[in-house]
Image (spheres, rainbow, N blue to C red):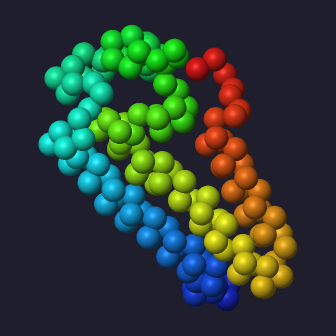
Amino acid sequence: MATPNMNTQASEEQIVYAKILEKGMFTGLALMVITFVLYVFRIVPPMIPRYEIANYWRMPVKEYLEAINNNYLHLAHPPTGWAWIYLINKGDFLNFIPIAILSGITIMCYLVIVPTLLRKKDTAYVVMCLAEAAILTLAASGLLTAGGH
């Protein structure tokens, strides 16, 4: 029985995608360690005292957000979606930056390979990459909501 001719070499766009993904992953990981150290050693003071955090773990997210807003934040509305950006001067919210980087690196990967795909005249993949990047960006934006959560 003949074996199918399988190409085991990575394509140019796969290599570019992997390099960006690797750099983004290491950047996000390094920032996660740094922001955790800043939080744990109180170099950047937290909004919610560490000894109080365990009291909130048992709560559903909505109740948690309402409770910390009432007890510590005192905002007009509990912070949802991207509202954490306004609180990054606090150690317990600062660590959201590397999480956002790790979550968004895939979007960057798709956009970075588009020029390579255009050069190869691979229109179908260009459209798919741009659509995927747009869908992921729209999903991350918080503009669309679904369900009752």
The answer to whether residue 79 is left or right of residue 128 is left
Which of 51 and 130 lies nearest the eye of the viewer?
A: 51
On the rendered structure, is 85 left or right of 91? right
Rendered residue at 61%/58% (across/down): 107
Residue 119: x %, y % from top left: 78, 85
**Which quarter of the figure has residue 64?**
top left
Taking the spot 83% from the left edge, 69% from the top edge, the residue there is 124
For the C terminus, the image quarter is: top right
Q: Report the side of 111 relative to 28 (left or right).
A: right
| Residue 57: percent from left, percent from top | 30, 21
Residue 105 % position (x, y) = 53, 59
Q: Quadrant of the N terminus?
A: bottom right
Q: Residue at x 78, y 85 (%)?
A: 120
Q: Quadrant of residue 146?
A: top right
- Is any part of residue 125 visible from this angle? yes
Residue 59 visible in the displayed image: no
Place of residue 23 in the rendered image (x, y in percent of width and height, measured from the top left)? 44, 70
Answer above or below: position of 113 versus 132.
below
The answer to whether 27 is drawn above or below residue 38 in the figure is below
Q: How many tags in the picture?
A: 0
Measuring 39% from the left and 39% from the top, which residue is drawn there? 88
Decide: is 126 above or below 96: below
Q: Compared with residue 80, is residue 134 higher up or lower down, i.e. above or below?
A: below
